[in-house]
Image (spheres, grey):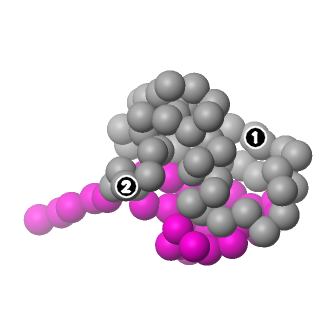
Amino acid sequence: MKLTVRYFASLREALGDRQQLSGLPQSLTVAQLRQHLGQCSPAHEQALRAGKAVRCAINLVMAADDAVVPDGAEVAFFPPVTGG
């Protein structure tokens, strides 16, 4: 399975703009993808660890940790945003 992973806001500052991933198992959930990405570097582990407030979108649609990521998807990670 191939994916494009994009990072926004403070995650982008820590991890860069994007990553291209391939060779991932099918039926990967968002939580499993976060765990896999956390193994890429200490910065990834710190930014994406379980329990850390990070939002996710798959192909521009908000997704929960149990959402399955389809092959060829663009997955975006970003911190929660507040406004006023």
Mark 1 or 2 closer to N-term? 1
Q: Residue at x 49, y 35 (%)?
A: 45
Q: Which residues are magenta?
A: 55-84
Give the amino acid at mark 2. Gly
What is the x, y in percent for residue 34? 57, 50
The spot of residue 36 in percent (x, y) is 65, 45
- Nearest to the observer: residue 31 or residue 2: 31
Amino acid on which disc 1 is placed: Gln
- Residue pushed farthest top? 42
In the foreground, 56 or 51: 51
Q: Quadrant of the C terminus?
A: bottom left
Residue ID at (56%, 55%): 76
Label drawn at residue 20: 1
Q: Secondary structure at mark 2?
A: loop
- Report if residue 31 lies within the magenta region: no
User: From the viewer's perspective, is residue 61 above or below residue 11?
Assistant: below
Asked if residue 9 shows in the view, the reply is yes
Residue reaching furthest to the left: 84
40 shown above or below 66: above
Residue occupying the point 62% across, 34% down? 39
Q: Where is the N terminus found, in terms of image quarters?
A: bottom right
Distance from the alpha carbon under mark 1 to that under mark 2? 24 Å
Q: Is residue 18 visible?
A: no
| Image x and y of residue 40, in percent | 63, 31
Q: Which residue is mark 2?
A: 51
Q: For the residue carrying disc 1, how many other residues have a C-alpha within 10 Å: few (<14), some (14-19), or many (20+)?
A: few
Place of residue 17 in the rendered image (x, y in percent of width and height, measured from the top left): 56, 36
Element type where label 1 sits in the image: strand
Q: Are discs 1 and 2 less than 8 Å apart at CB?
A: no
On screen, 15 above or below 1? above
